[in-house]
Amino acid sequence: MADDIEKTAKNNDAIGAAMAPPRHSEWRRISRVFFGRKLYAIGFAICVLLIIVAIFAPWIATHDPLKTDLRHKLEQPSWTHLLGTDSVGRDTFSRIVYGTRTSLLIGFTAVFASAMAGTLMGLAAAYFGGWVFAIIMRFTDAIMALPGIILVLLIAGLAGGGIPVVIFALGFGGIAGMCRMMCGQALSVKQNDYVLAGRAIGMSDWRMMLTQIFPNAFPPLMVGITMGIGGVVLGEAGLSFLGIGVMPPTPSWGGMVNNGQSYLLTNPILSLAPGVAIMLLVFGFNMLGDGVRDAVDPKLRGVL
Amino acid sequence: MTSILDVENLKTYFKTEYGLVKAADGVSFHVNQGEIIGLVGESGCGKSVSILSVMQLIQKPGEIVDGKIIFNGQDLRKYRSNGPEMRAIRGSKMTMIFQEPMTSLNPVLTICRQVTESLELHLDMDRQAARERAIELLKMVGVPDAASRVDDYPHQFSGGMRQRVMIAMALSCNPMIIFADEPTTAVDVTTQAQLLELMKDLVTRLNTSLVIVTHNLGVVARYAQRIYVMYAGRIIESGLSEDIFGHPHHPYTIGLLHSVPRLGEKHGSRKLIPIDGMPPDLINMPPTCAFLPRCTYKVEKCQKEPWPALRAVGDQHYISCYVDIREK
């Protein structure tokens, strides 16, 4: 019988090698799904563009974003000032370019911090259950009981603005959502046989959480993260608009919209340009999030 | 032959809203080195719970309330269920093959990652050595083109191939005992035969013990040396395979054998007789024999006395029944 098995195995080997369809690597499949849709590709392009702008801001900007020039204040767009100047003569285009840095810095750090904390808490709650679950979930309930904007206003107002405060305020508010999302996913993933199988080969709790549960619960979270960036940037703009976010003179899109609103009738571009930048960023990251979800979700493998 | 696993009077209960479910209620069995054991019974009779209890994989609300589990001279009940001692045993000395090959592999990790996992955990191999060993293992279980397929994901494998991967994973650390929980239920009959031959061949070659849990008598008849028949959380008959199939003594076993056709039997030469009634509700168990309502051999004593303990009716042949039945 043993011989038979080996013979069949050898035979299978030959057949398998000859007949197996060409197999694509996982990356090629992901990129095919992702770039196969125009909208996702556009979203991706916008995000890449914004990141490039943020990194190379000093080379792209035409003027020093902080330099005031009262002789040339409130100028209309021209070749020297592509988007005109504001009430103290600062170049709007350069301020938007530098504002990308502020927005992305705040967006990425706040979202990653809240995703990290939320993931750890959600995983622990789902995996251990019992009192760990109860404590963590009551904590997220407490955060969620306060309307998001009030919580953020409270923190930012008490600590008095500035980039680190904005990051903390927006990140802290995001923990609850991330934690709940992770917890829900992890609870359903936990029911799968491969989690039991992991235990059956002697994995530790920590390893189980990281290798068996986390990768399977991650795709929806990835969407949450990319879309969260858009949300946080919007939140930051709101705070800066209200004057308790990023402190002037640091360029921030929200603050620029605020500054421009007194000249809305005469110089609408002052508020409009940063507004469009915010919109573009939020749109880009939302599309990126959707595309990433479709491309990496293991449940959609073979379908798309 | 030396016994490597001794389970005595194992009781695993589940506390549910409706009452206490005695899923395993005083199960005793032993496994010798290199032996293939069959654990047979219908759905919900406590087969899987018994072996999950041995591996300490019972989850809440289940709990092992009593019994001894001696494996390789160690009392497993002394260890915490996910403590370091238990983790060192699980996956290296004691492994398990699951029923559903479609769901027991992690969909987001490559086959390589999953097969090498226990090699890295227990044998401290480095990535490269573990990878080579994984390819070797996959070849051993008959996965074609193993060297390139090792980097595939589970969804690129068929059900039978996945079960082969599961077998490779179970064998990876040269375990002393493998529990196969309905290993062939989810695959078709041809694949089933291939997989069982493969398992039998591999365990005899590696001198590993194998416990096959199944509801399929055909599966154990051919491969198991000894058989335990379970009913309602208890073992009701045990013995050598020839004795169980040749001279069954317990009314339930007799009923089971009457209800399945045998290969080589002339068509229509024997009527198949089903066992009347339904398996009992494990929550409200009567103090008497749980098979009593369905039993065709019952005597007056059965109604009064509690569930009988196992008694010997032959060499290595035990039944839990008051009645002495000689099969014609």
Image (cartoon, coloured by chain):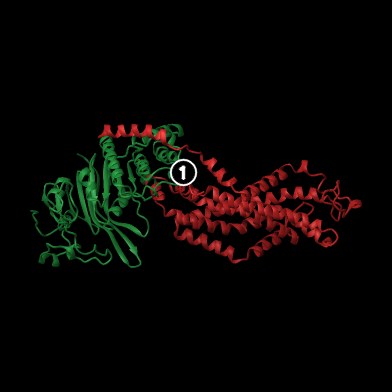
Whether residue B312 sits left or right of residue B286 in the image: it is: left
Q: Residues within 10 Å of mark 1 (few under 14, many from 20)?
A: some
Question: Compared with residue B28, is residue B149 higher up or lower down, i.e. above or below?
Answer: above
Q: Is residue A160 visible?
A: no
Q: Residue furthest front?
A: B267
Question: Compared with residue B89, is residue A258 higher up or lower down, i.e. above or below?
Answer: below
Residue B252 is situated, as x and y percent measured from the top left of the image, at 17, 57
Whether residue B259 sits left or right of residue A280 in the image: it is: left
Whether residue B239 sits left or right of residue B151 in the image: it is: left
Residue A70 is situated, as x and y percent measured from the top left of the image, at 90, 52
**Count of numbered labels shown in the rendering:** 1
Whether residue A111 sits left or right of residue A99 in the image: it is: left
Residue A23 is situated, as x and y percent measured from the top left of the image, at 48, 38
Specify the quadrant of the image occupied by residue A64. Answer: top right
Mark 1: which amino acid? Leu
Quadrant in which the N terminus of chain A appears: top left
Q: Is residue A150 visible?
A: yes
**Residue visible at 37% across and 56% down in the picture:** B59
Question: Compared with residue A148, is residue A224 higher up or lower down, i.e. above or below?
Answer: above
Specify the quadrant of the image occupied by residue A139. Answer: bottom right
Q: Nearer the viewer, residue A66 or A163?
A: A66
Q: Nearer the viewer, residue A226 or A116?
A: A226
**Residue visible at 56% across and 46% down in the picture:** A33
User: Which residue is under mark 1?
Assistant: B109
Hue used for the chain lettered A: red
Specify the quadrant of the image occupied by residue B93. Answer: top left
Q: Nearer the viewer, residue A141 or A271?
A: A271
Give SS at disc 1.
Answer: loop
Q: Chain drawn green, letter? A: B
